[in-house]
Amino acid sequence: MTSPDTSSLDDARALLAEFPVVDGHNDLPWALREKAGYDIDRLDIAADQTGSLHTDIARLRAGGVGAQFWSVYVRTDLTGDAAVSATLEQVDCVEQLLTRYPADLRRALTAADMEAARAEGRIASLMGAEGGHSINNSLATLRALHALGVRYMTLTHNDNIAWADSATDEPGVGGLSAFGHEVVREMNRSGMLVDLSHVAATTMRAALDTSVAPVIFSHSSARAVCDHPRNIPDDVLERLPANGGVAMATFVPKFVLQAAVDWTAAADENMRAHGFHHLDTTPEAMKVHAAFEESTPRPVATAATVADHLDHMREVAGVDHIGIGGDYDGTAFTPDGLDDVAGYPNLIAELLARGWSKPDLAKLTWRNAVRVLGAAEDVARDEQSRRGPSNATLQQLDG
């Protein structure tokens, strides 16, 4: 890519110093699980982890990150109570990070906590569960995750669950089942953001029909720009102003660059043929990726590619309803110029060059995400004043 000029980068960094990035999704906890068995002595993010991770503290600082939703994701081949236990281990990993790096990371449970962290010059650290399989069809487990600090849940990951359809699976319940709608209502009542990344478009629409709180897309881009089912159709983006929600553009090349879609399908099949899960980023798996890439060069996305999505999302949803969710440490490949968490200034410089105003960029990076979490807290207080927790079950509602 063409590197931004020094002046543009200086302007981008100055803006991020005042209104840092709230990033919607980073898979560092899963990377620590897979690569080090949660041994953070082996992968100490106080040290430079370039080549091992997309994320360390110095690069978060260089990237102007002021708040991070750490994903407490677990793969969908973990089911039932095993999925719940693994999610709790992920939560514990974030707790260990907060304990180990208190000068840099600050626990954040509320919008006010995020602002306090910004004032202190620390990185507000929130958690998001990725996939409804993490609650094993239990609203009590959902509430327990909220009590532990989880502030959003992605309704599905790559596979359907009993009550919600995924974007990358065959239609199951037609969006959300009756229990799925109850999950959304209980998330509203508890103050947990409904995350619609990874879900089918039918699920997006069903959740918007039910949610009385703003929703988020923690890491999804525009389907009109790159026709991949993980992205957001325009009719859904058009509904965000009425809902108050935020769509946070992802950087994953196979979701933002049309030419990368077919290449990725072939690369994933190559991984499976070699006995690896297609999302595996362990050193052994990456050797297989590298060999495939050497024989079949991958199309390269850039910061401009991501900016194309943000331009479109701003046009359709409005500048008050967009954000950033890089998906670092959850993808094998990243765009040129957005190689790791230090890259956000390159994206902001690109947007400045396209004429984005500083007030609009402040909304993109900080203000929109903070507003949405605060609005979810307001809805939760209202809902809790009117009704108690739901103890409905999948069997009762879906038969």
Image: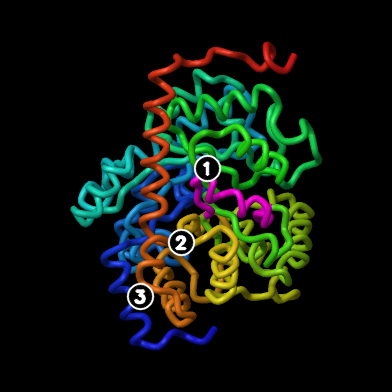
Tell me which colouring the rendered structure shows. rainbow
Q: Position of residue 238 (x, y in %)?
A: 61, 54
* Mark 2 vs mark 3: in front: 3
**Location of residue 346 by image quarter:** bottom left
* Mark 1 vs mark 3: in front: 1
Q: Residue at x 63, y 57 (%)?
A: 285
Residue 77 among those drawn in magenta: no
**Amino acid found under the numbered disc labelled 3:** Ala
Residue 234 among those drawn in magenta: yes
In the drawing, does residue 223 fall left or right of residue 365? right
**Amino acid found under the numbered disc labelled 2:** His
Of residues 138 and 308, the one nearer the viewer is 308
Q: Are marks 1 and 3 in contact (CB under 8 Å)?
A: no
Res 328 seen here: no
Mark sitting earlier along the chain (1/3): 3
Which residue is denoted by mark 3 in the rendering? 12
**Amino acid found under the numbered disc labelled 1:** Val
Q: Residues within 10 Å of mark 2 (few under 14, many from 20)?
A: many
Segment colored magenta: 230-247
Which residue is denoted by mark 2 in the rendering? 54
